[in-house]
Every structure is written in structure tokens, then in C-alpha cells.
Image (tube, rainbow, N blue to C red):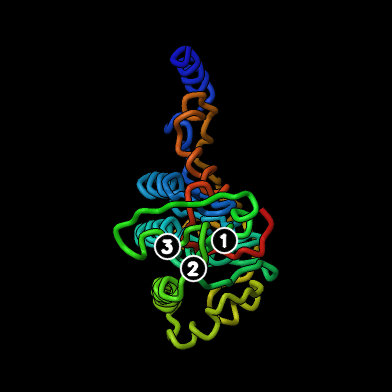
Amino acid sequence: MLFFWGGITFFVASLTSPSRSELFLHEGIGVVELKGVILESEETLEHLVAFREEPKIKAIVLRIDSPGGAVGASQEIFDEVRRTSKVKPVVASMGSVAASGGLYVSLGASKIVANPGTLTGSMGVILKFANLTGLFEKIGYKNEVVKSGRLKDIGSPSRAMTGEERQMLQGMIDNVQSQFVQAVSESRSLPAAEVEKIADGRIFSGQQAREYGLVDQLGNFSDAVLLAADLAGMKAEKMPELVYPPEENFSFLRLITGRKNESLLQQTGLSGPILAYEWTGTLR
């Protein structure tokens, strides 16, 4: 039965999904959207690579509306954006929120455009653990652990964190924070000492970000598109054609086994703590 429904969805997808030839009929600007908490990078990387390798896509606009997310995923997207910008223009367009990891991924772009009121910044690293000792005492739950080293169960919700554990984690956080500062310093040609002054987790507006040297231009999505077209040497007589990646069609098989399930687990916290470039003041 599973294979039957899988075959049906594959058949429907083949009828509704545009082919590669249908997507790239004319020269245009590719648009890659990065929305919500960044928990995985694979889909965004695929879109960037596809647009980078397509000759009819002359430039790319990376539209960001994200409070950030997992450090690893943010760094992977940043690296791919930077690699792509060496082949063709990539303009990062910040929407309502492009904070922490959302700011980080934009650093690889050729140019960064933000609205004056875009909420950005929040340069920092966070790692959260649950402490459920009070709850466990009330319900009579006890956790027995056998471990190979004293730090093996670091972050266990059944006990308080030790001073040694906190010191070790702080050292790791500081190291990853320095990676953020270095990326900003190198990408924006800013002294690391100046970046460190504002890399304390504070948030600021797009207008302030421009004053700090983190943004090249104030403007909306259309401004970012026109800038990308100009960088690509396209005629600016009218708005260039925009090309979006094909939407993934519903798949019963992917619903059961696909990577989206992993993201769901991460969002609920069931997969464990995540080292994050994330502004946690946003609503989810």
C-alpha cells in the first residue's frame, strides 16, 4: 500500500512540477528564500548550486527572514553563498528579521540590502539545556548513569551542571563566537576589535546596521533585485524576470522518512541541545 501511494504521488508530481527547461526559459534573477529558524542547510545549498550552474540565471537574490538557528547549518549556507558570489552576483535581501545566523549567512553575499526597520544583529552563540531536577524530585524519577568520562553526560536534565562543565562549555561558546566575529570582520572589511564591540548579542535596526558597516544599502526586495541585475550587467529598463526553485510536492513517502521530520524533532528539542547563532527573543 505504501508503494502504491508513493507511486501515485510521484505521478502527480511529474504532472505538476515544472521541468528544468520550463524553469529556465529566459535570462533572469534566481531567488532563494531562507525563512524561519535555520535547522538544516541541504535544500538551500541545492538551490544555490542549481542557480550558480545555470547560465540563464545571471544573479541571485537571497531573501532572508530568519532569527538564525543552528551554527553548523548557518556556516554551511554562508560558505555556499560566498562560493556562489565568486561566480555570479549574490545580493542578500533582509526582510523583517535577519538576526544572528540570519545575519551570518548574508555575509557571503556580494552586497547586503536591508530595510531601515529590519531587525538584525544579535551576534552571539547560545546553547540551552533543560534542568528538570525539581520536576524529577516531585514525580520520583531517578536517572542512573554509567559513563566512560566525567564529562560524558554534560547537560543532563537530571542534575545541576558542575563548575567544570560550565567552564568547558563557555570555552567552546567563546571559540564559536570568535568564528562569528572573524566572519564579520573578513566579509565586511571591518577591524575585529570594532566588531567585538557590537558582538554582544544586541539587536539593531537595518539603519543602524548600515552605520556599523554590516549593510551596503537600505531598500526593499525590489531594490535588491535591481541591484543584483545591475551587478550582473543586465538591462535595467524593467524589473528582470524572477526565477524561484520548484516547490517540493507532497510526498507520502517523504512524510514518513524525509529529512523534514528531523527538523521537526529539532524544533521540539527532542533531538538534544543545538549550538545556535539564534536570536531567541522572536516568536515561533
- Image coords of residue 250 (percent x, y): 54, 28
Q: Earlier in the sequence, mark 2 or mark 1?
A: 1
Give how far apart the Cα atoms at labels 2 and 3 are: 7 Å
Residue nearest the viewer, comparing 60 with 163:
163
Q: Are marks 2 and 3 in contact (CB under 8 Å)?
A: yes
Q: Amino acid at mark 1?
A: Asn
On the rendered structure, is 8 left or right of 67? left
Residue depicted at 47% across the width and 58% down the height: 156
Q: Is residue 209 above or below residue 64?
A: below
Neighbour class for label 3 at 10 Å: few (<14), some, many (≥20)?
some
Residue depicted at 43% across the width and 84% down the height: 192
Label 2 residue SS: loop
Residue corresponding to mark 3: 154
Q: Quadrant of residue 77?
A: bottom left
Does residue 18 appear anywhere in the picture? no
Q: Amino acid at mark 3?
A: Ile
Label 3 residue SS: loop
Residue depicted at 53% across the width and 75% down the height: 214
Residue corresponding to mark 1: 131
Residue extending farthest front: 140
Residue corresponding to mark 2: 161
Residue depicted at 65% across the width and 53% down the height: 138
Residue extending farthest bottom: 193
Neighbour class for label 1 at 10 Å: few (<14), some, many (≥20)?
some
Residue nearest the viewer, comparing 135 with 205:
135
Q: Amino acid at mark 2?
A: Met
Q: Are marks 2 and 1 in contact (CB under 8 Å)?
A: yes
Give how far apart the Cα atoms at labels 2 and 1 are: 9 Å
- Image coords of residue 127 (percent x, y): 50, 64
- Image coords of residue 179 (percent x, y): 40, 72
